[in-house]
Amino acid sequence: MPVPPRARAVPARFMRPVRMGDRLRRRAWARGAAQRPGDLGRADRFSRLKGDDSEVSNPKKTRATGARGRRSNRMSIKDVARLADVSYQTVSRVINDDPRVSDRTRDHVWRIIQSTGFVPNPAARALVMRRSSLIGILTDGSTRYGPAGVLAAVENAARDEGYAANVLVLAEADSRGTVRAYQHFIDQGVAGIVVIAPKLPLAEAVRETKFSVPVVMVAAGESSVPGVAVVSEDQEYGARLATRRLLDKGHREVAHLAGELSWLDGRVRLRGWQSELRAAGIEPPPHIQGDWTGESGYAAGRRMLDEGLPSSIFVASDLMCLGMLRAFYEAGVRVPDDISAVSFDDSEFAAQFYPPLDSVRQDFNRLGQEAVHMLLRLIQGEPAGTVAIPPVLTVRSSVARPRAAVARSSTTG
C-alpha cells in the first residue's frame, strides 16, 4: 500500500489565529488591488480565498459601505467647529446671527464655512432656535393679474425676511382640500401659512379649518376671525374712487361692468360702485356681468351698443375694459367723447390703451409685505387684526364731461 507523502512542517509564525486587524488589512489590500489596472485577477483570487468575508466578493455590501462612506464625508457643524478651532455652539451662533459672537470670530467661522461648502440644515436650525425658517403659501393657482401679483409679492417679502416659501396650489378649494394642504405644511415644519384666496369657496374653507400655526389670509372684503388674520387691498374703497371720478365730472348715468361674482374682488367692487351711487342719491341700475376676460368685455360692449350707451361706465378690470374698447372702436364710438370709462387694476398696459385709461392701482408689493409682516408678528405671539390697504386712482385720459353738459356749456357760453 502506498505511503502518503510526509506533511511539511508549518512554521509557528503561520499558526497564530487570524486577528481582526489582519482581516481589515487584507480587505484594504484587496480594495487597493482591485483599483490597480491589470491586477484585477489577484484581487479576485484573494476574494475567493477569503469567501463571504471579503467586500469585493459581496457587491451589495460594497455598495452599502460606499454609501456609508459618502454620508460620513458630509460636513457637519462639528467638523466646521474643529477646523475653525471653536466650539460647535459658536458655529451655531454664527449661523443664526447671534450678537454674542465677536466680528472677528464671525468672519473667521464664515470663511471656514465657505471654504468647506458646509450647508446648515434648516430642520436642525429650527430645533435649536425653536422656530422654522419656512412658511407655507396656499393658493388656488389662478393666473389672473391680481392673484399672480400677490403670490409673487408674498414670496419676495418672505425671502427678504429670511424665510423660504413652500407654495402649494390647491386644485379643490374646499374644506377637505384645505385640511390636506394644512397637513402637508405641518409635515414640512412651516412656521406659519399665508393663504391667497381670491374666490369665496377657499376663503370659507380657511375660516372653517382649525390651524395650530399662525395663518394670514389675503382676501378682499374679509375680516379676521380667531386663528386667521386678514390682509387685503380695500377694493370697495377703490371702486368708490372710480365711481366718484365719473360723478365728479358731472355724470349721473354710471354703468358697471362687473367681474365674476364667485370672486371676492368682483363682489366688493360691485358693492363699492353701488355704495358710491347711493351716497350721491342715485339708485344703481342693474350691472352688466362679465367674467374677467377680454371676450366678456367685448360682448358687453356689443350689448351696450345694441341697447343704448350710458354716458359713463366703471369696468372691474383692465382686461375687460380693453375688450369693451375694441367693440366701441369697431362701431366708431369714441372714448371719452361719446362715453367715459374708468377701470380697475392699473396694469402695466393701462397707459398703452387708446385712450390711456384712468384706472385704480393696487400696490401688490405692499400687500405682500403686510401679509408677511403680520404673519411674523403672529409667529412671535403678538396680536394682529385686519389690515385694508387703500388703493389709489391713476388719472389719465379716458374720462371727460358728459356730452349733454358740454353742449349746454357751449350754447350758454
Image (tube, rainbow, N blue to C red):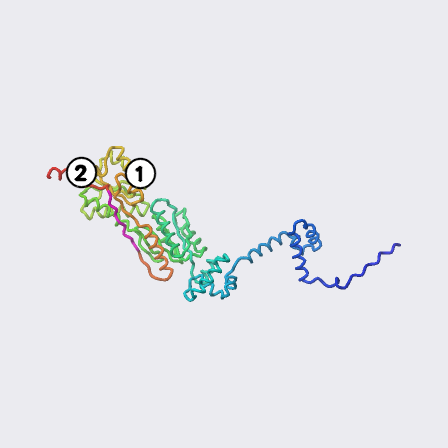
Question: In the image, is 140 to the left or to the right of 389?
Answer: right
Q: Residue at x 29, y 39 (%)?
A: 322
Could you give the CA–CA distance between mark 1 and mark 2, rounded to whole angstroms?
A: 27 Å
Amino acid type at mark 1: Ser
Image quadrant in which the N terminus is located = bottom right
In x, y percent, where is residue 360?
Answer: 27, 46
Task: Return the mark for residue 18.
Answer: none
Q: Secondary structure at mark 2?
A: helix
The answer, for residue 255, to whether it is visible in the render is no
Element carrying mark 1: helix
- Tell me residue 366's x, y (percent): 32, 53
Which of disc 2 and disc 1 is earlier in sequence? 1
Provide the residue designation for mark 1. Answer: 296
Residue type highlighted by circle 2 = Arg
Q: Residue at x 42, y 57 (%)?
A: 133
Residue behind mark 2: 403
Instruction: Assess disc 1: are there few (<14), some (14-19) or many (≥20) residues with their C-alpha within 10 Å of its C-alpha.
Output: many
Residue 134 percent location from the top left of the image: 42, 56
Q: Is residue 288 left or right of residue 98?
A: left
Residue range in magenta is 387-396
**As drawn, is 143 to the left or to the right of 17?**
left
**Prevailing secondary structure class for the magenta stretch in the rendered image:** strand
**Residue 394 magenta:** yes
Q: Is the C-beta separation of discs 1 and 2 under 8 Å? A: no
Nearest the camera: 242 or 195? 242
Relative to the observer, which residue lies in front, 411 or 205?
Answer: 411
Q: Quadrant of residue 308?
A: top left
Crowding near the residue tagged with mark 2, few <14, some 14–19, many ≥20 C-alpha atoms within 10 Å = some
Placement of 105 over or under 356, stated as above or below: below
Residue 389 seen in render: yes
Nearer mark to the viewer, of 1 and 2: 2
Most extreme residue toward the right, as rendered? 1
